[in-house]
Image: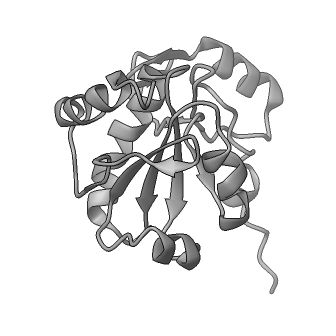
Amino acid sequence: MASAPSTAASSLAPPPPLCSSARAARLRLPSSRPAATAALTSALIVTRRGVVAPGGRLARLRCRAGSVRLVAQDEFEAEVLQSELPVLVDFVAEWCGPCRLVAPVVDWASEEYEGRLKIVKIDHDANPEIIQKYKVYGLPALILFKNGEEVPGSRREGAINKIKFKDYIEPLLATSNVA
């Protein structure tokens, strides 16, 4: 006897974006009732902590900054070395726990320093030539590039919080050879 197809997975539509333009979040809503889905979507209130549904219940969402871009080896020269803005490269890996701790700080910094600093991420495992060329031995690693070259003294490895990040980046941006 054949069973009916499961409606749990098939009734979920691709999640719609709900955060501000600099952030993108996704929420799963049933697509089997478009009118109800539209009403629910319009009644949602987006906050910094998540989405508040009509019943006042907070649904936490993972918002990711859209301005931090994952750059591949073939894009490195155009995105980093030929950029008119200073570029902070965040070397990361999926399996790296400290990289996940630093990710919110890097996302925050991409918004905080928008227009003054471009931030990109390089996947350690997918870009071995870049890793070897710049001798990235520890993760996460931050390196600032200006005018196609690594800024002397800009290399930093390990986890970092917002306060330490500001202490790290502000002097580099203030120096005449970077700004």
Q: Position of residue 17 (x, y in %)?
A: 66, 31
Q: Is residue 35 above or below residue 160?
A: above
Relative to 81, is 114 above or below?
above
Task: Identify the coloring.
Answer: one colour
Q: Nearer the viewer, residue 53 or 4?
A: 53
Residue 57 found in image quarter: top left
Residue at the spot 77% in from the left edge and 40% down from the top edge: 31
Q: Is residue 116 visible?
A: yes
Left or right of residue 171, residue 66 in this image = right
The quarter in which the C terminus is drawn is top left
Q: Residue at x 71, y 17 (%)?
A: 39
Point 80% across, 87% down: residue: 1
Instruction: List x then y, in percent, for residue 155.
Output: 31, 53
- In terms of depth relative to the viewer, which is nearer, 118 or 109? 118
Q: Position of residue 164 (x, y in %)?
A: 18, 36
Marker count (numbered) = 0
